[in-house]
Image (cartoon, grey):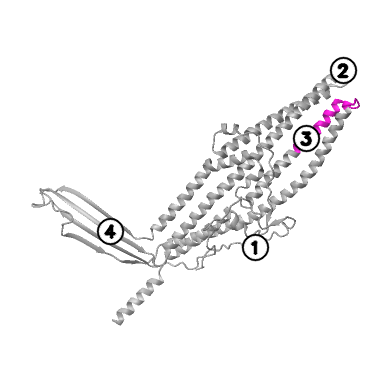
Amino acid sequence: MRLHTLVAATGLALVLAGCASSGGLHPDGTLTDPNSLHAERSLSKVAVSPAAWPAADWWTGLGDSQLNALIEEALKDNPDLASADARARQAQAQAGAADATRKPTLSAGASLAGARLPNSLIPSPIGGHFEWVKYGYASFSWDLDVWGGKRTAWEAAVGSAHAQEIDARAARIELSTNVARAYSQLGYAFAQLDVAKAELDRSKSSYDLTRQRVSAGVDNQITLKQGETEVASAEREVAVAERDIDSARIQLAVLLGKGPDRGLDIARPATLNPAAVAVPSSLPAELVGRRADLVAARWRVEATSKDIASAKTQFLPNVSLSALGALVSGGSAGLFSSRDRFYQVAPAVSLPIFDGGRLRANLAGKDADYDLAVAQYNKTLVGALNEVSDDLSGLASMTTQIDAQQRAQDAAQQAYDLSQQRYKAGVGSYLESLIVRQQLLQSEQRMAALRSQQVDLSVQLIQALGGGFRPEAGDQPVAAVAPVNN
C-alpha cells in the first residue's frame, strides 16, 4: 500500500512538474502619478479657484439662446451619440454573457421518431414493423470557479462596460464643444462678410473716383488698373466669406444629425461672450476624475488587470460537474410511464499539461493589453494637463493681442473720422478718406478674427477641463494598480 502511494505521489509530482506554467510573464506598465506632473510654474500667473470646474450646461455662458437650442438638438439627434450608446449596450451585454459562464446550466429536450426496419436487416418481431420511439432528457453542467477565474473575467467585462458608458458621456461633451466651435466659426464668417462687403463698396467708390480723375487727366492708367485689382480682390473676399458661411452651416447640420437645409435655418449668431472659466486649484490631481476620457482610460486599465488574473487561473486545475437523465419508450407506451431510464453523474478534474504554449501566449497577450491600457492612460493624462496649460497660455496671449488691436482700431477709427472732417471742410480729398477707410476695415477684420479665436480657445479650455463632466456613484474604478507579477 505504501509502495502504491509513493508511486502515485511520484507520478503526480512529475505530471505537475511538466504542467503549463505562467512563470516569468508579467506586465511592465506603470501608471503615472498625476502629482508627479508639475505645472506650478506654467500656472503661476493664473488665478485659481477650488470651484472653478465648468458647469454641466457651460454653453449657456456664451450668451446665445439659439446656440443653447442647437446643442440640445444635437445631443438628441446626433447619430454618433446613438453609436456610442449602442457600443455601451453591447459592452453591457458582453458583461452579462461573462456573468452567465459562472453559473450552472440546465437544459431539457424531447424527441419523437418513427421508423420501419426491413426484415432483411433485423428479423421479426422488430423488423418489418413501424414503431414510434420517444426520447426525453434533462442535463445539468457546472464548471466550478474554484480559482475565481470566471469571476475576474466577468469583472473585466464589467470594467470594459463602464469604460464604454463613460465614452458615451465623453461623446456628448465633445459634441457640445464641437457645436459651440462651429457656431462661433459661423459668427466669424458673417463678420468677415460684413468687412468684405464694406471693402467692396469702398474699392468701387475709389475706382469710380480714380476713373473720373483719369478722364480729367489728373491720374494715369496705372492707378486705374490698381483700382480694378482692388475691386476684383474685394469681390473674391465676398465670395470666400459667403462660402465660409455655407460651410459652417453645413457643418452644424451634420452635428445636428440633419440635412443641409437645416443649416439654412440657422440665423446669424449673436456676438458670443468668451466662456468665463478660472483654473481649479486642484490641478492636476482632480483632472483624473473630471475628464471622462481619463475615467474611461482608468476603467480599461482596471479591466485589463482583471483579464490577467483570469488568464492566470487557466494554468490551474479545473473542476466541473455534469449530470444527465433520460427516458426512452417505444410503441404506444407513454414516455413518463416507461421503465427505460438512464442516469449519469460525472464530476471531472482537468489540468493543462502541454498545450503548445497557447496559455502562455494568451497570458503574454493580456500583459501586453495591460501595458497598452496603461500607456494610453498616461498619454491621455499628460495630454490633458498640457492642453489646459496651452489653452490658458493662448487665452492670455489673446487678451494681450485684443488689447493691442483695440488700440490700433481706435486709432484707425480716429484717423478715418479726421479724414472725413477734412473732406467735409474742403481741406482733404474724398480719395484720401477712402484710403484711410481701407486701413480701418483691415483693423476691424483682424479684431473679428481675434475675438473669434478667443471664444474658440475658451471653449477648448472648457473641454480640456472636462466639459462639465460630473462623476456619478460607481463611475470611478475601485483600483487601477498593476497585477501581481508572476
User: Gap between marks 4 and 2, in whole Å?
Assistant: 110 Å
Compared with 395, 17 (above or below) is below
**Earlier along the polypeptide chain: callout 3 or callout 1?**
1
Q: Position of residue 195 (x, y in %)?
A: 74, 32
Mark 2 Cα-neighbour bin, 10 Å: few <14, some 14–19, many ≥20 = few
Residue type of the residue flagged with mark 4: Ser
Upstream in the sequence, badge 1 or badge 2? 1
Q: What kind of residue is marked 2?
A: Ala
Query: Distance of mark 4 from mark 1, alpha carbons?
Result: 57 Å
Circles 3 and 4, Cβ within 8 Å, touching? The answer is no
Place residue 436 in its image quadrant: top right
Q: Start and end of the magenta stretch?
A: 423-446
Q: Is residue 421 left or right of residue 200?
A: right
Under circle 3, the secondary element is helix
Which mark is first along the chain, 1 or 4? Answer: 1
| CA gap, disc 2 and disc 3 | 31 Å
The residue tagged 3 is 442
Q: Give the CA separation, mark 1 to mark 2.
A: 77 Å
Q: Which residue is mark 1?
A: 35
Q: Percent x, y for residue 320?
A: 34, 64
**Looking at the image, can residue 241 be seen?**
yes
Q: Residue furthest left?
A: 124
Image quadrant for the N terminus?
bottom left
**Which numbered tag is attached to residue 139?**
4
Instruction: Estimate the x, y position of residue 365 in percent, counting from the top left.
Output: 49, 59
Is residue 368 visible to the viewer in this orientation of the structure?
A: no
**Secondary structure type for disc 4:** strand
Mark 2, residue position: 216
Q: From what the image shows, is residue 312 above or below residue 59? A: below
Mark in front: 2 vs 3: 3
